[in-house]
Image: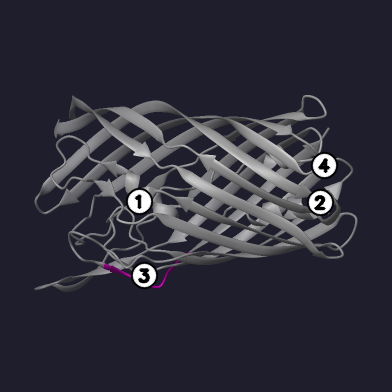
């Protein structure tokens, strides 16, 4: 049954992308490696190809198309889990939890020349203590680094800024209940917010940059409830409910005339449910559905989406101690109306693929 769980993890590898979860969430900050059996190492890669475009109705020129505004991006993850003794385990996880890759390049569109490129790197260290065969607790720290480049162009002028890397520390605590005989596990995990103060420079003339006050903001706290259970021979039901407090995030760099640059009027809850099945001693597969409700509010031109519905399938093939996993996800992006110019973004989508190599030792 544990091999089915691994296949399910592959199918859910891309549970959040830049198309949902507040527009900045990418990895979902998973901790599933902590629950692998024995010592384990995993290397994963993901590629996301969004298709996001909209139209702005000009009172004189009529309907103007934005062109595709969301760039492709990739994800690289690494996890190492080791049993220190019969009760205590350690996991180290590398990922890129947040990001943005938006660019308006359609001639004639009011925001032509606008782009945002936000990058992050995170290292998470976790310990898990087994109280007995049923109960365990886990916790640790996460170190997150973030940096960005930004340019907002409009008929009123251009604002450009560079946000140098800053690193913040957050903490994680949680608990899990398990019944191994039926592959049941329910895990509740809380991750604290992280506070940033990025050194910032703005362009005061073409090619001339000047430092201004640091840009201070927080990335939100979150709570994730993960569950799985056997429902029939060689068949596993699994899922996640994840709440993220995006209303706590507001980014207002000095000198930007339309502050806040980034803010959210609602928190987000993402629901995922799926089924995994072991077809043979070597091969397992899984299918799952994820949903995030649209809020119906105006959204940022740097994140012109609202909610999502997606379906993903994945599989896992085991050879001795090596496990090869892969998944593909199709995302139906919620329609949205942007603030400032009131552009309409509709009928958008995205495609994501993920693969990983795991080794039990």
Do residues under tags 1 and 3 come within 8 Å of each other at their CB atoms? no
User: Is disc 2 placed on a helix, strand or loop?
Assistant: helix
Residue that appears at 28% across and 49% down: 263
Residue 285: horizontal and vertical position, in percent? Answer: 76, 61
Residue that appears at 34% across and 55% down: 303
Q: Residue tagged by mark 3?
A: 335
User: Is disc 4 placed on a helix, strand or loop?
Assistant: strand
Numbered label attached to residue 3: 2
Mark closer to the observer (2, 1): 2
Which quarter of the figure has residue 111?
Answer: bottom left
Residue 281: horizontal and vertical position, in percent? Answer: 90, 55
- The answer to which of marks 3 and 4 sits earlier in the sequence is 4
Mark 1 residue crowding within 10 angstroms, few (<14) / some (14–19) / many (20+): many
Which quarter of the figure has residue 166?
Answer: top left
Numbered label attached to residue 102: 1
Mark closer to the observer (2, 3): 2
- The answer to which of marks 2 and 1 sits earlier in the sequence is 2
Q: Main secondary structure of the magenta part?
A: strand
Distance from the alpha carbon under mark 1 to that under mark 3 = 17 Å
- The answer to which of marks 1 and 3 sits earlier in the sequence is 1
Q: Residue tagged by mark 4?
A: 322
**First to last magenta residue range:** 344-349
Residue 15: horizontal and vertical position, in percent? Answer: 56, 55
Residue that appears at 43% across and 66% down: 293
Distance from the alpha carbon under mark 2 to that under mark 1 = 38 Å
Mark closer to the observer (2, 4): 2
Distance from the alpha carbon under mark 4 to that under mark 1 = 37 Å
């Amino acid at each position: 049954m544990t091999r089915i769980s691994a296949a399910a993890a592959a199918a859910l590898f891309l549970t959040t992308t830049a198309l949902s979860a507040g527009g900045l969430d990418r990895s979902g900050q998973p901790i599933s490696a902590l629950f692998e059996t024995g010592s384990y190492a995993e290397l994963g890669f993901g590629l996301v190809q969004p298709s996001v475009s909209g139209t702005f109705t000009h009172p004189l020129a009529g309907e103007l198309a934005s062109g595709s505004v969301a760039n492709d991006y990739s994800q690289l993850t690494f996890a190492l889990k080791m049993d220190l003794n019969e009760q205590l385990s350690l996991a180290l996880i590398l990922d890129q939890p947040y990001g943005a890759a938006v660019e308006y390049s359609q001639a004639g569109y009011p925001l032509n020349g606008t782009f945002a490129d936000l990058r992050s790197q995170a290292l998470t260290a976790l310990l898990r203590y087994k109280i007995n065969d049923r109960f365990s607790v886990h916790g640790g720290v996460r170190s997150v680094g973030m940096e960005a480049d930004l340019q907002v162009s409009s008929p009123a002028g251009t604002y450009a800024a560079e946000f140098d890397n800053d690193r913040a520390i957050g903490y994680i605590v949680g608990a899990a209940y398990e019944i191994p005989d039926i592959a049941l596990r329910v895990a509740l995990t809380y991750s604290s917010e992280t506070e940033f103060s990025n050194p910032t420079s703005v362009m005061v003339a073409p090619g001339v940059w000047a430092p201004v006050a640091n840009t201070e903001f927080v990335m939100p706290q979150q709570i994730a409830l993960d569950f799985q259970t056997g429902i029939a021979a060689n068949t596993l039901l699994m899922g996640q409910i994840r709440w993220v407090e995006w209303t706590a995030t507001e980014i207002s760099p000095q000198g930007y005339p339309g502050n806040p640059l980034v803010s959210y009027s609602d928190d987000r809850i993402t629901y995922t449910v799926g089924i995994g099945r072991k077809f043979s001693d070597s091969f397992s597969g899984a299918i799952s559905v994820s949903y995030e409700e649209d809020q119906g509010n105006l959204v940022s031109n740097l994140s012109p989406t609202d909610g999502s519905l997606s379906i993903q399938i994945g599989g896992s093939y085991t050879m001795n101690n090596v496990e090869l996993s892969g998944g593909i996800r199709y995302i139906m992006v919620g329609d949205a109306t942007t603030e400032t110019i009131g552009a309409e973004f509709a009928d958008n989508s995205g495609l994501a693929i993920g693969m990983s190599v795991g080794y039990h030792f």
